[in-house]
Amino acid sequence: MSMNLNGFFKKMAAGSLFFGLLPVAHADEGMWVPLFLSQNQERMQALGMQLTAEDIYSVNQSSLKDAVVIFGGGCTGELVSGQGLVLTNHHCGYDAIQSHSSVEHDYLTLGFWAGDFAQELPCPGLEVRFLKEMRDVSQQVLQGLQGPDGKPLPEAVRQDSIRARSLRLTAGLGQGEEGRVVPFYYGNQYFLFIYEVFPDVRLVGAPPSNIGKFGGDTDNWVFPRHTGDFSVFRIYADSLNRPAAYSPENRPYKPKRYLKIDLGGYEEGDFTFVFGYPGRTQEYLSSYGVEQILEQEDPMRISARTERLAVIKAAMDKDSKTRIQYSAKAAGIANGWKKWMGEVKGIQRLDVVGSKREYEKVFGQWASSPQGKAYAGVLPALEKAYQGYGAYQGMAILFQEHTLAPEAVSFAYSFRKLCQASKTQDSALGRILEDCRARAEAFYKDYDPGVDKEIFLRMAFMTEKDGTRTPVIEFPGSTLQKQADRFYGKSIFTQPERMLSFLEHYKPGQYKTIERDPLYKYAVLVYGQYLNQTAPAVARFKKEIDSLQRIYMKGQMELKALSEAASRDSLSRPDQGLSNTGTGILYPDANFTLRVAYGQVAGFSPSDALYCKPYTTLDGIMEKENPDIYDYVVEERLKDLHARRDYGRYANALGEMPVAFIGTNHTTGGNSGSPVLNAEGNLIGINFDRNWEGTMSDIRYDAEMCRNIMLDIRYCLFIIDKFAGATRLVEEMEIVGD
Ligand code: ARG
Ligand code: GLU
């Protein structure tokens, strides 16, 4: 370390006003890349882990990672038997369960249990992915991405080369394999992931909603929690155990690895880890980025959804058909809504913007010194970019949350292709028509024009009322009420019977009926505005922010490395122990790649004088029980088992039936369904949520307040075995610890 640098560090430390105001460093924040887990091994073992990093992820041998899958588009699942049995959350299996449900076979309400293999239900479109391999390809992707003058290439050119190189890296894979090249640290590193994709996944079992979704949206994001949030699927493969499209000939898949289930439970303080696919975090944003989320993005989305949900809930309460049609939609809308509310509170409570500003002062000072000069203009440039971005982002959110809230709009717009193909007599017309028919069927199954009309009106009036916002819902020539009457009285898109029969007898010349349709015209108008004006501006600013964020990230990493070196040499650290995340550990932000988050089973204190124990029990379900409140109905059979304390081998040492528990594992959306493992690497739970007070952990993790919520595996097995009598499934599993 040169003297020169040393002097700089000392000056920085002397100027510090805020040393000591920072959150206490907590080593267990983070979502770690399994390939590099050896760097965490010591800490994990100190917390009690009996495994090595190699047991969890090994390049050469079978390891725990072979038992973890991407479930569907955005969840995690785990293998729990030698016959391809997969556990995930109820809310991850929800679409599959719902698509098999009708008023006659209401699997959502009543649950479903296949009595044997033959009764397991195929789920077209549902896939699971096993990670075969991950590899650092930063060299291949990034090498020489500079112009002849040594300056970085223009962003668009850079992106094009990266895309081309990524395509090359993922070419030539085997059957059933899929390659993805994924940026880490905002594009400072790239990794190649190779997955094996299994398209034949069948529904094996699901508890009734009043178990799988107990507490509903009332309890969502909340602890104490009593949701039995699991469902059971099975992967099928061809006769050679390879991935294959659905066929009655397929057989249960024999996995390389499955998890043992430990009924031995846990104590507060015990080591746990969560192994799965966290979707997205933004721990390294600038204060300007966080401000935008706090001041604009979250509040706008929250207020739009408050209105939309009010309409849907009222309709669901009135009618059981509507309840089935809209339950999955409502859950999806409410989920983000509630999470953002918690996020806003958490960001405010921790003064994330303020503490980022403090970090940025230090960063700025360093960047204006000779050592940091590569980063000199980056923060001011980010500030400016966010200023420009704000208005367009606002318009984009209006389009997404208001204009597209009535579902008929995007549905109508999707008929563009049919019109085009009809006009040009395209040879693909037949296929496109088929596709429209299938989509119409699926759309109308869960659609109520009356509800949609009400949403249209509420959203429209809301934007009209609020003069500060760009009116995106504007259709020449009539009042909103008249427009609504036309869209929902005259348009063919909001008349299911008429549309289905129209499509059945469709002749190419009839595209005119579509083009003259008022709702179709409206959809074309608002999409046109969005696609031609808003979206390109959003993309331009996003691109700029992304490339600045990449540089800023690199700066943060460099400053961090300098600081570590300085503290090893016991010089004052250039960042004074400050970091942009709150802990100073630079794990990469989540990007829906496999990660390990570890921590301990731990209670927490949500507010003054209150302390939450780390687990709930069936007694708590009985306390919440209320036959008049949909979210808190308890089945007779469950009450009965409770009354008799008939918990079999699944009770804890105190004779209680544990339901959910919490810990300090740093998780996010996508971790749903992730296995929760104990010190020996056995399954003790299924991750399904976080506490509301901790949802800002996507932006700033706080060890005091952030908890992940996990289903106790003993409750899961109790429901399968004692409640549903699906004992054949438990018999497939390898159970230890009882
Ligand atoms: N909050 C959890 C997650 O983010 C669970 C969502 C599903 N449950 C519900 N009640 N909507 O996905
Ligand atoms: N429920 C979330 C999911 O579906 C997990 C909760 C979280 O965001 O941590 O992935």
Image: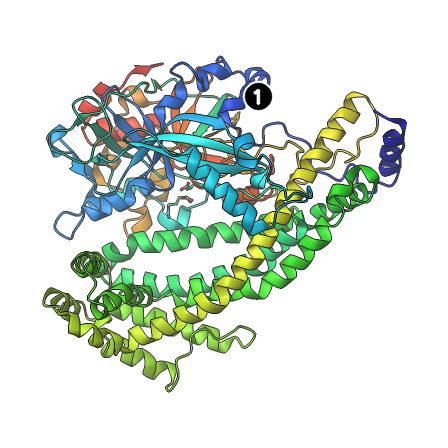
Residue under numbered circle 1: 40
Drawn side of residue 510 relative to residue 314, left or right = left
Closer to us: 267 or 462: 462
**286 is higher (above) or lower (below) than 637:** below
Instruction: Quadrant for residue 274, please give it.
Output: top left
Q: Is residue 629 visible?
A: no
Check the picture and name the quadrant holding the C terminus: top left
Closer to us: 185 or 11: 185
Dot 1 amino acid type? Asn
Ligand 1 placement by image quarter: top left
Instruction: Name the residue located 57 percent from the left edge and 41 percent from the top edge.
Output: 186
Whole-percent x, y for residue 167 in the image: 42, 39
**417 is higher (above) or lower (below) than 89:** below
Toward the front, the furthest residue is 148
Q: How many marks?
A: 1
Instruction: Name the residue located 43 percent from the left edge and 31 percent from the top edge.
Output: 193
Check the picture and name the quadrant holding the N terminus: top right
On whether ligand 2 comes within 8 Å of the CB at mark 1, the answer is no
Closer to us: 43 or 164: 164
Report the colour scheme. Answer: rainbow
Whole-percent x, y for residue 511 in the image: 21, 72
Q: Secondary structure at mark 1?
A: helix
Instruction: Name the residue located 28 percent from the left edge and 31 percent from the top edge.
Output: 176
**65 is higher (above) or lower (below) than 719:** above
Closer to us: 404 or 342: 404
Toward the bottom, the furthest residue is 477
Drawn side of residue 13 relative to residue 528, left or right = right
Q: Is residue 96 visible?
A: yes
Whole-percent x, y for residue 239 in the image: 16, 23
Drawn side of residue 653 relative to residue 539, left or right = left
Whole-percent x, y for residue 565 in the image: 76, 25
**223 is higher (above) or lower (below) than 303:** above
